[in-house]
Amino acid sequence: MDFSSRTPGDLSSNPVAQAIQRAAGKGILDLTESNPTQCGFHYPPSLLDSLAQPDAFTYDPHPLGLPCARQAVAGYLKAKGQKVDAEKVVLTASTSEAYSYLFKLLGNPGNRFLVPTPGYPLLEHLLRLEGLEMVPYPLRATPNWPVDLEATRKAGTAACRGLVVVNPHNPTGAFLSAADRNFLGRLCEENQWAYISDEVFSDYAYPGHAFTPWTPSGTLSFRLGGLSKSLGLPQLKLSWIVMDGPQEALAECRERLELVADTYLSVNTPVQLSLPQLFKSTDSFQNQLLKRVLGNRQFLEERLQGVGQTRLWPSQGGWYALVEIREKGDADDTIVLELLEKHRVLVQPGAFYDFPEGCFLVLSLLPPMEVFQEGVVRIRKYLEKA
Ligand SMILES: Cc1ncc(COP(=O)(O)O)c(C=O)c1O
């Protein structure tokens, strides 16, 4: 049987994935866990009561989302200081689905999208599933991971249709600087590429840092967010796109996006009707999560002090920590395998995120404090022996 090349030719799992499978159920300390519902956060039992409202028995779909739900998203963003017109909001079942809608809207098979590297590994798959190609544009390995502007300009070709930014970035936790976003925005305007801004972690700025919403005005732009991160409930399956751009192009974009969304009608009615209620809990959830992330990060910072060969990279927001191991000489997946098999602690290798050089470990900062701390103590012991 022939299958399309949208899924990979080789389905075998990599050595780290195989080792994780072997270790399953053997009491591993998992410092990769980034599913908030598995991390011991408190969700008030009444939080989901509004999903059971009687209006949810009626199915009256709107391709771009129910007006009351789009209004609720605009209201949520307004409370965050962002002026958003509900007419420009489009609902999807997840941020991954939001990407898939946009890639269908903007790209023909073989077209390309510029994607920051190192970065979120799912993007390459999401593009490939639409018959599209990823063109990496490099971030420079210095604090705040600025964009390599010249390399980015050179990476663009006539086949490009858009550029993705992730703000704050996953896994570096860096916010896009004003200089970088102005440059990237101008590049998109000059080439009439779409500017896609993934803002799923924008609620989680660390003290002293802030998220600045921004899109270029001379081309189409799309900002992405969703409940999986803003309320820690990925299973509710509700994300949003905020589209913007020059009036005429935006009107056509809206119509075409409506057609894509109408083909699937994937967002469920109960969650849309519940949105006004659900958004009332975002502050308390986000405070709880940020406290966990900052507490775990502080512990990590303290424990790595004095371990000569390691460096915790500075970060400005998000859920991840980046640890660089400088003098060991091993590849990051070798270290990850040793940590897993000999010390029963799981972290991700930088290779998963395509770091071009250096040896990086990526840790989720979400695990419960006891799990995280014990995991970090084991990592320190391992590094000290090295
Ligand atoms: C940068 C980034 N974008 C998008 C997503 C996907 O979010 P969703 O669960 O809404 O599909 C993730 C998930 O971790 C992510 O890290």
Image (cartoon, rainbow, N blue to C red):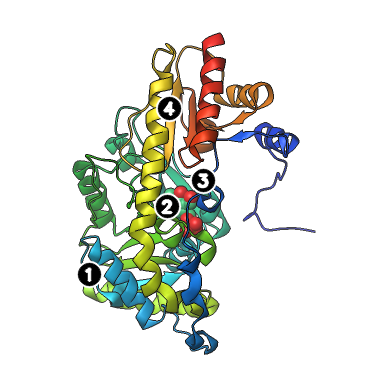
* SS type, badge 1: loop
Give whichever of discs 3 and 2 has the lower sequence position: 3
Query: What residue is disc 2 on?
Result: 113
Give the mark nearer the N terminus: 1 vs 4: 1
Q: Position of residue 91 (x, y in %)?
A: 42, 71
Of residues 112 and 67, the one nearer the viewer is 67
- Vertical arrangement, residue 341 with respect to residue 329, above or below: below
Residue occupied by mark 3:
34
N-terminal of the pair, mark 4 or mark 2, is 2
Left or right placement of residue 27 versus residue 217 in this view: right
Task: Tell me how far mark 1 sits from mark 4, CA to CA.
Answer: 46 Å
Give the mark nearer the N terminus: 1 vs 3.
3
Q: Gap between marks 3 and 2, in whole Å?
A: 26 Å
**Element type at mark 3:** loop
- Foreground: disc 1 or disc 4: 4
Circle 4 Cα neighbour tier, 10 Å, few/some/many (<14 / 14–19 / ≥20)? many
First of labels 3, 4 by sequence position: 3
Residue 294 % position (x, y): 36, 37
For marks 4 and 2, give the CA distance.
36 Å
